[in-house]
Amino acid sequence: MNKEIIQLAPLGIWRNFSKINAIPRPSKKEEAIVAFVVRFCENIGLEPIIDTVGNVIVRKPASFGLELRKMVTLQAHLDMVHQKNKDTIFDFDMQGIEMKIEGDWVTANGTTLGADNGMGAAAILTLLESTDIAHPPLEALFTIDEETGMTGAFGLKGGILKGEILLNLDTEEDDEIDIGCAGGVDVTAKGEYTTVPLAQDSVGYVIKIAKLNGGHSGIEINKGLGNANKIVNRIVFAGLPYDVQICEMHGGGLRNAIPRESFSTIAVPNKLEKECVAAMQIAAQEIKEELYLVDAQLTITIEKCALPQNGAMETIAQQKLVKSIYAAHNGVYSMSAAIAGLVATSNNIASVSVADGKIQINCLVRSSITSGRNDMANTLKSVFELAGYEVAFSGAYPGWNPNPNSEILKTLRAVYKQLFKSDPRVVACHAGLECGIIGANYPDMDMISFGPTILGAHSPEERVSITSVAKFWKFLLVVLKSTLNSSDKRNF
């Protein structure tokens, strides 16, 4: 456990965050972190419940004098996004996260940090173990697999939770109170191609895209960040008039992360080598100039390599591949008419894999409007079906409809203004939060989301503000003391 980290204030949160980060916890492999949470609760005299899908639920009686308050459900997810820099040697299945302090920030050594949503989970554990914090009856809900399908939230059955208020601790700006979020759907295109021999007198080249910022494909989709899959495809497109042959193409990873790295191995006819490389280098320079304000560290290399031994795509197949990726929308598709500055609908071309006669393109569509989500998904389906690919939709999840008249929202606004002498920003976000899914089975639960400031989530640039964690903790403690009795109708 990092000695510098556990000495940060508030001590409880940082100590528990360090314990959480010592445990490998990739999505769909949460057994170790679930076992840790169960042991943690049992050791402090609480009785955790593991539901049928692996979520952990535990309750704690109210502190003296607050027994008649509404029960508050505190919710966070246990899994984290696993991303690392290409040159970082790290085994997410075996190693705990290596943390470090940089000024006001805690970050990791070349990997994602796991503050999303480890900070929320750490705050809940700290409340559960406390003996001197005033709070109403508490119910903790630790969900699994939020990052790759929200299967924990989907699998949570009605009737298990007892809370009347749900505080989701998964928002990433400390001056925001979130009252709504986008829904989403996975779009997967698959195809096959015939492999043909390389043309005689060909020269091998590899195009590498690296050091993009990447990030959260919902929260940061509005920043115009570079998408490595679109970039490498654009450079290959520049080489098509010079008879390039695509041997392989690989880029990106998780659907909810903007891809930071991609590469393509190609063969270039010797007689057109100079012209082809020049055209691709021009395209590369144009891209760097377009992105220099948002992705200043972007590197694009076009280097000679040994000719691949397993041939290349036949010409028509590679034309369809490159043109379909070029035509497929990536980034913001539409903005919300209801909330200024909010992205309504977007798509992330998250990963591309082309090798050994197989093609797979994975996208994540998000939208605050179900019809907008479906429209974007059908737009992609149309593009990829025109290329001859099979397209499937999966993992659809609903958005969370804002309730501006929420009682808990009134409480949070009043507490925030009292503590920080300014009004919070009441927002809906373009990320996927579990509130909408949980709300389907608990329609009467009053829900809100907030948290400390986290930047670069879903990328190795992920970091959490130390001062913001202290602010978040102070806010949470006062909110818990300010919740209503079941019959209370205070006018804030």
Image (cartoon, rainbow, N blue to C red):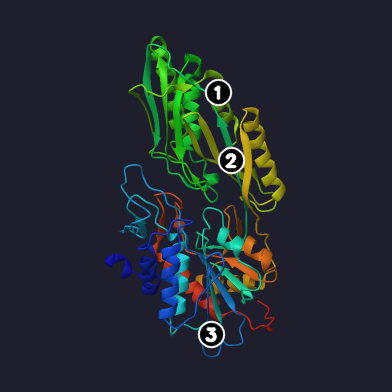
Toward the viewer: 11 or 413? Answer: 11
Q: Where on the picture, by quarter, is residue 363?
A: top right
Question: What's the residue type where badge 2 is placed?
Answer: Thr
Residue 188 badge: 2
- Within 10 Å of the Cα at label 2, are there few (<14), some (14-19), or many (20+) other Cα atoms? many
List the residue tagged with mark 1.
317
In the image, residue 10 sits, relative to residue 386, either above or below, namely below
Q: Quadrant of the C terminus?
A: bottom right
- Residue 389 appears in view: yes
Q: Residue at x 48, y 38 (%)?
A: 226
List the residue tagged with mark 3.
61
Toward the viewer: 57 or 446? Answer: 57
Q: Residue at x 46, y 27 (%)?
A: 286
Indicate the position of residue 254 as horizontal and vertical percent values.
Answer: 49, 46
Question: What's the residue type where badge 1 is placed?
Answer: Ala
Q: CA distance from mark 1 to mark 2?
A: 18 Å
Indicate the position of residue 484 as horizontal and vertical percent values.
Answer: 63, 81
Toward the viewer: 95 or 13? Answer: 95
In the image, residue 407 sits, relative to residue 464, either above or below, namely below
Toward the viewer: 160 or 80? Answer: 160
- Within 10 Å of the Cα at label 1, are there few (<14), some (14-19), or many (20+) other Cα atoms? some
Q: CA distance from mark 3 to mark 1?
A: 63 Å
- Residue 343 appears in view: no
